[in-house]
């Protein structure tokens, strides 16, 4: 009778090699991930990755970046290491992959795990044991935080061990949220800059970098710091033809600006789902209270709330739960897809154009990310960046030209 390990091993091997057909990639996407076709650019990225090239992927939020590295990971020999900034997001992705149900039950669940401080006891030991497993680990995707990869000797040594095996068992390094590498990115992280050292350590291991936001300067910087060999960037347009943008001068004084916001909300049919971004936690509560008084079905959402309170809001909004509007800080950001949101208003000017773009295309509630243990910038640099970011937003607001064109030119289009 096959043991659990045997069955798992057979499945791992089957995923890598046994999928053979006229179009192996589409078939794998369908059988393992349940996708019947590729989104724009996915196939080209996946093919380049399968040829062993370094790839840089710049696709807007929701563009399907994950499949660009998950499918090559599943089909390649060995383990793909995915560097991702936040443990909370890592755990979500690992859970989703482990529960993945494509159209072929034989491939249900992609062998995925993670390493990060804060994992339950015994977890790391089990992952280490698999990385030592002969002739090869069962894991296909290993998510790690940058700290883990850079500062944990055991992890580095185990991965170097995979590189040294014959044939090598470290398939690829994936750097997700790659804008964090560059000081020009809007979420710079010091450990990310040092990921280039891995390139020196494991010369033959290809790299994939992915992001949803990068200006030309950021992009060039990331490629240089990660020592990427290919200069080709796979990208699609950032244009969202189904969105329209407008900027309105805010009335002075609390009451007048609330009245202005209310008029905007009321120009939509009753019950239309919307999101109002505010600058601070306090502002979300104040705006919410003022709108409640006017009879709007509204809730607030920010990182100072308990997980339970946040979940309640997520259940009530945007459809079916009785709340049509949420006043939120940017804590309502990355995570679960929420369709049906018809408008996003920024009650206060957003901090950067990257932020504005993300917030207007991605009304998705999720638990707020934990505070980063590392300073993102030195204080002076941070101030300088904040000023530059605010100036670009100001310029965007004041420019007498098409908002869409102004926004796209900021992203180098
Ligand atoms: N080829 C495809 N066919 C159908 N759905 C797809 C395809 N590729 C991805 N998706 C779906 O699109 C959604 C967004 O994909 P994904 O999370 O990879 O986007 P992303 O580019 O990583 O976005 P973000 O910047 O928010 O992380 C997911 O629900 C995913 O299952």
Image (cartoon, rainbow, N blue to C red):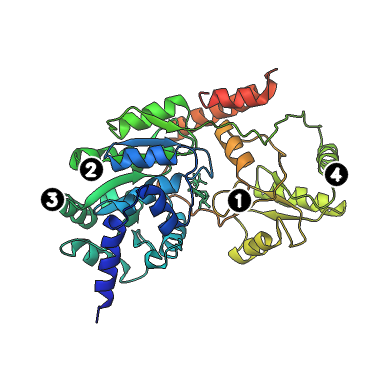
| Mark 2 or mark 4, earlier in chain | 2
**Location of residue 264 by image quarter:** top right
**Location of residue 196 by image quarter:** top left
Q: Identify the element where label 2 is drawn.
A: loop
Answer yes or no: disc 1 within 8 Å of ligand 1: yes
Seen from the viewer's position, the closer of residues 117 and 318 is 318
Give me the C-alpha separation between circle 3 and circle 1.
Answer: 42 Å
Answer yes or no: disc 4 within 8 Å of ligand 1: no
Give me the C-alpha separation between circle 3 and circle 4.
Answer: 64 Å
Query: Which residue lies at the image location 31% right of the left edge and 52% below the top edge?
Result: 75
Query: Which residue lies at the image location 41% right of the left edge and 65% below the top edge?
Result: 108
Kindly identify which residue carries mark 3.
164
Asked if marks 3 and 2 touch (Cβ < 8 Å), the reply is: no
Q: Nearer the viewer, mark 3 or mark 4?
A: 3
Residue 266 numbered tag: 4
| Mark 3 or mark 1, earlier in chain | 3
Answer yes or no: disc 2 within 8 Å of ligand 1: no
Q: Position of residue 65 (x, y in %)?
A: 45, 44
Asked if marks 3 and 4 touch (Cβ < 8 Å), the reply is: no
Seen from the viewer's position, the closer of residues 374 and 136 is 136
Kindly identify which residue carries mark 1.
364
């Amino acid at each position: 009778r096959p043991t659990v390990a045997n069955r798992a091993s057979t499945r791992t091997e089957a995923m890598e090699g046994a999928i053979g057909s006229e179009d192996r990639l589409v078939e794998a996407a369908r059988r393992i991930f349940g996708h019947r076709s590729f989104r724009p650019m996915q196939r080209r990225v996946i093919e380049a990755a399968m040829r062993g090239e370094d790839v840089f992927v710049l696709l807007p939020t929701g563009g399907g970046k994950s499949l660009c590295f998950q499918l090559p990971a599943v089909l390649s020999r060995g383990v793909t290491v995915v560097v991702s900034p936040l443990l909370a997001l890592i755990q979500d992705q690992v859970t989703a992959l482990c529960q993945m149900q494509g159209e072929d039950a034989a491939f249900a669940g992609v062998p995925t795990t993670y390493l990060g401080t804060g994992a339950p006891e015994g977890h790391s030991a089990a992952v280490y044991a698999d990385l030592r497993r002969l002739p090869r680990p069962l894991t296909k995707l290993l998510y790690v935080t940058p700290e883990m990869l850079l500062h944990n000797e055991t992890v580095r040594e185990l991965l170097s061990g995979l590189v040294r095996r014959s044939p090598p068992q470290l398939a690829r390094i994936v750097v997700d949220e790659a804008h964090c590498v560059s000081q020009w990115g809007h979420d710079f992280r010091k450990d990310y800059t040092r990921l280039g050292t891995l390139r020196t350590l494991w010369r033959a291991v290809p790299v994939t970098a992915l992001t949803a936001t990068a200006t030309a300067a950021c992009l060039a910087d990331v490629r240089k710091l990660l020592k990427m060999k290919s200069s080709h960037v796979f990208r699609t347009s950032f244009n969202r033809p189904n969105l329209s943008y407008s900027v309105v001068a805010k009335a002075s004084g609390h009451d007048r600006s609330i009245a202005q916001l209310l008029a905007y909300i009321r120009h939509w049919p009753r019950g239309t789902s919307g999101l109002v971004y505010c600058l601070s936690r306090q502002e979300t509560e104040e705006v919410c209270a003022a709108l409640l008084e006017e009879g709007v079905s509204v809730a607030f959402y920010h990182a100072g709330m308990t997980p339970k309170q946040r979940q309640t809001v997520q259940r009530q909004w945007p459809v079916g739960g009785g709340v049509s509007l949420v006043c939120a800080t940017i804590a309502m950001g990355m995570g679960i897809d929420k369709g049906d949101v018809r408008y996003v208003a920024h009650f206060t000017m957003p901090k950067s154009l990257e932020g504005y773009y993300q917030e207007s295309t991605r009304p998705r509630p999720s638990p707020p990310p934990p505070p980063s243990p590392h300073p993102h910038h030195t204080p002076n640099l941070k101030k300088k960046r904040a000023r530059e970011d605010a100036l670009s937003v100001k310029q965007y607001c004041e420019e007498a030209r098409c908002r869409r064109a102004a926004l796209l030119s900021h992203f180098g289009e």
